[in-house]
Amino acid sequence: MLKTILLYHFMSDDKRSKKTVDLNNYVDPTDLSPKNLELGLWLATNKKRIYQIIIIILASLAAGFLLYSGYGYFYYFVFGQEQDRVLEQTAAEVNLANYHLQTKPIDLTYNQARVIATSIGSDFVVHIKNPNEKQSASFNYCFTANGKDTCSSGFILPNEEKNILLVNSTIKSPSGVADFSLQNVSWQKLKAGDIPDWNAYKNQRLNFTIGEPKFAMYDDGVYYLEFNITNNSSYGYFEVPVNITISQGSNITAVNRYIIKDLSSKQTKAVRLSWPEAAKSGGVITITPELNILDSSIYKPYGSN
C-alpha cells in the first residue's frame, strides 16, 4: 500500500510543482479513516472469494441437514416403525389395564351366616350386599354346617341388599352360626343405552304390595301363613319367588321360600303356606319378592296378562 501520494498543483504560471503528502496525516472530509479505506479495498478485491466461502458454508450446512434427515428417515423405517408399534401396544395395554382397574366391581360383602334347625334338617340364611350401582352379579354359593356343605346358585341386582335363603337342607345341625362362601362370581354391567335410569327401571318392575301376613289354624290343626300379593307393575311374570323371614329383633328365627306361579299385571293372589314350626316361634314376618328383572325369560309376553 502506498504511504504517500504525489499531488500536483497547478500554479498561476502553468508550472507544476511536486509535493509529498503523508496519508496518515490526511484528513478526509467524509470522515473515512485509512483503516476503513483499507477494509473496503480488501472487500472489493476479495468479493468473489467471500461469495465462494459463503456458498461453501451454506452448502455444507444444507448437506449436513440433508444427511441428518436422511439418517432419521432411514432409522425410522428400519427401527422406528417397530418401536412405535410396541409403544402403541404398550400404551393400549396400560390404558386397558387402567380402564379395568377403574371399572372393576367392588366385591360383594355379607354378614355372618346362620343355620336354623328344623324337623327335617336345617335352613340357612345370610345377608348379602352389592355396593356396585351399575353391575349385577350371578354366583354359586355354599353354606357349611357340622362339617357338611349345601350349595346352590343365586344373583344380586345393582346396589341391592337382600337375604339369601337355602331351605329344607338335610344337614343336621343345631341352630347357630354357619360358614358361607361365594364361588364363580360373574359380573354383568348395565348398558346405559338399554337402562339409562336403573332406579326407574327397577321400580317399574319390582312394584308389589304384600298384604299383612298372619298365621291361621284350620280344622286340620295345622298353622298356615296367609298373605295377599298384588302385582302393581305393567309386567306379568311366569313365577315370582318370595323370601320369607321371621325375626325377633335382629335375630332371624325362621326362614322359608315360596314360588307364586303366573302372576299377571295388576293381579292379586292369595297365598296360604303350611308352616307350623314358624307359627310357634313368633316375631316379625317379612316377605320379599326375589326377581332377576334383568333376565328377559321371567316376563310373560304382552297380551297374555
Image (cartoon, rainbow, N blue to C red):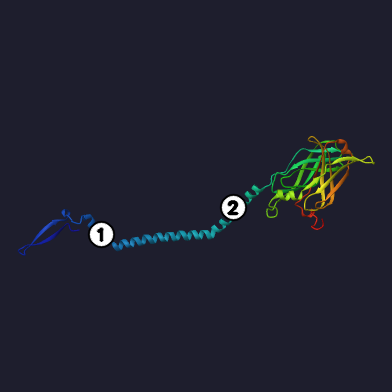
Judge whether 6 appears above or below 205 on screen: below
Q: Are marks 2 and 1 in contact (CB under 8 Å)?
A: no
Q: Looking at this rendering, what residue extends furthest in the right direction?
A: 219
Quick check: 12 left or right of 192?
Answer: left
User: Which residue is the site of mark 2?
Assistant: 91
State the residue lying farthest toward the bottom: 14
Residue 146 visible, this angle: no
Left or right of residue 170, residue 140 in this image: left
Front residue (pair 186, 10)? 186
Count of numbered tags: 2
**Would residue 128 be seen by someone viewing this image from the given angle?**
yes
Say what secondary structure mark 1 lies in: helix
Residue found at x 25% / y 59%: 42
* 2 to 290, vertically: above or below: below
User: In the image, what residue type sits under mark 1?
Assistant: Trp
Q: Nearer the viewer, residue 110 or 133?
A: 133
Q: Quadrant of the C terminus?
A: bottom right
Give percent across and percent down for residue 294. Answer: 75, 52
Mark 1 surroundings: few (<14), some (14-19) or many (≥20) residues within 10 A? few
Residue 172 in which image quadrant:
top right
Query: Relative to 134, does residue 13 appear above or below in the rendering?
Result: below
- Point out which mark residue 273 bears: none
- Of mark 2 and mark 1, the one earlier in the sequence is 1
Image coordinates for residue 252, horizontal then vertical, percent? 81, 37
Which residue does the numbered mark 1 point to in the structure image?
42
